[in-house]
Amino acid sequence: MRAIDLAVVGAGPAGLVAAIEGAKRGCSTVVVDRNPKPGGQLIKQIHKFFGSREHQAGTRGVDIAQRLFREAQALGVTLMLGWDVYDIRPGRLEVVRTSFVELTSDRPAASLHGATKTESISSAKIVLATGAEENAIHFDGWTLPGVMGAGAAQTMINVWRVLPGNRVLMVGSGNVGLIVTYQLLQAGADVAAIVEAASKIGGYGVHAAKVRRAGVPILTTHTVVEARGDSRVTGAVVAQLDASWNPVPGSEKTFDVDTICVATGLRPNTRLASLAGCQLTNSSVLGGWVPIHNNQLETTVPGIYVAGDVSGIEEASTALEEGRLAGISAASSLGKSSACDEEEIRTIDERLRSLRGGPFCQPIQDAKQELVRIGESACPKE
Amino acid sequence: MSEGIAVNGYVSQQELEQSPGYPSQERLQQGPVVVIECPQEIPCNPCEEACPYQAITVGEPITNCPQLHEEKCIGCGVCIAQCPGLAIFLVDLTYSERLAAVAFPYEYLPLPEVGQKVTTVNRAGEPVCEGEVIKVMNAKANDRTPVITVSVPRKYATTVRSISCPGR
């Protein structure tokens, strides 16, 4: 049994920063992540990030992952990469080595090898930074090979350098759909069109503008109704939607594509939070069920904190701020605080408020405030 | 709203003219100046710090649209590669008697070469005219966002925003 001060689940931006803040304040800290590489989704974000300098804006996500990884290592954080959490209780994690081996030139195929290894981690405080999962939509032929999440396509092209197909239909015009479209073009694929069920483009206009000037049409009030093909995708049927989001008969168009990417939103990955007994609440703005937490990001289970997309779908910039806050809160509840914690928490709050402004993000601010309002009565008090 | 960036995926002329990042006609006539095509309030400000002449401000809150102080902009184009949204362009109406120069970020391979004749495209990716590549900037500070400058007949300077994408 490993006994530590702080265990963080998830080595994405929120998790790594929580670990860094904990370690800075003298907590013995472990980060567990099932993936072989640190950085969570950052490692496939090859574009420059939005935000401000404090959020490393202008830097490519993949480079941010490297910086955070090095900083965590330098502070003595133990990274258990390739380990999965299979059970959680307050103060205790059970982990299993997934033995996922990285693809390299001398090891061209993924292999599962070695005896399964398990370990127990006893940890005074736990931060869950388990991120998000992609939503699926269902249509005729949706199980055909060639239909995939946009995130999967992004992992293929940017992490493994494999094109999922040559001609793609993108379903969904949120930032994920727009950015992955752009990156598919950069990787050498053609994107026939982006379809968007709503009457407006979901993501940032500047992301849309990049793919529009590359010649990709964005069809608003359209969706995919069928994937064609016997053993794999050979085409996609797209239809216009009426005001009640029903396909307009006769409006069908067929696109000659071999890949259909689905970018219809993300939902918080709350499995471990549920297993730990954290109370959840549903918020459509935040992406579905989210753990209730107070303004220190502590859940209804004492000693278990959340940060990043697991507590509501947002951006890497807000995940970094939440990670920072969760790390500081967890450390300070162990009596390991630094002199300027109060000042730092105030700065984090200000930055979060600022990031959660504007027409895209104000609804998130409101939803988060509501979550904290519930949390202030449901969560443990200091 | 029947047009504009949230519907078409690119800025309308009206959005541009109402945006604080768009230079005046007078300033455009005077020589190289940036055009910031970022009309939505999104949380982002690297352009502000990128400009060595303080010609771009975002301020607080970070969701403000970038404001161009056109009298301070010398048209160096340093900000182009620093904008994560790839939304900053440089327009020089005084490039030559007949031609204007337009610079834009371009993150595709292969990169065009100086002297190459290229098909320029507008904001919707539609071909506009033939242009000639006059500069390819890919310094370390660009962090893998090359900036391409093309010369085009002056009347196309406000519509040309890229060149045709190799994949399509």
Image: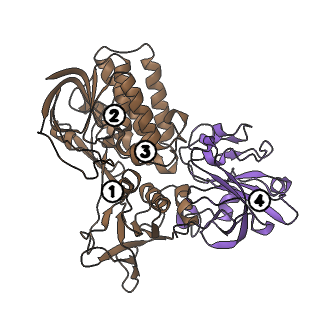
Chain colours: A brown, B purple
Q: Quick one: SS at disc 4? A: strand
Callouts 3 and 1 in the same chain: yes
Q: Quick one: SS at disc 1? A: helix
Give the residue displayed 45% in from the left and 55% down from the top.
A175
Q: Nearer the viewer, mark 4 or mark 3?
A: 4
Q: Measure how far apart labels 2 and 4 are at the Cα level.
A: 46 Å
Q: Measure how far apart labels 4 and 3 are at the Cα level.
A: 36 Å
Whether residues under marks 1 and 4 lie with C-beta atoms below 8 angstroms apart, the answer is: no
- Residues A217 and A184: in front is A184
Q: Mark 2 sits on what residue?
A: A15
Q: Position of residue A46 (x, y in %)?
A: 47, 48
Q: Mark 3 sits on what residue?
A: A315
* Mark 3 belongs to chain: A
Residue A272 visible from this viewpoint: yes
Mark 2, Cα crowd under 10 Å, few <14 / some 14-19 / many 20+, is many
Q: Position of residue A151 (x, y in %)?
A: 35, 55
Farthest right residue in view: B97
**Which circle marks residue B101 in the picture?**
4
* Mark 4 belongs to chain: B
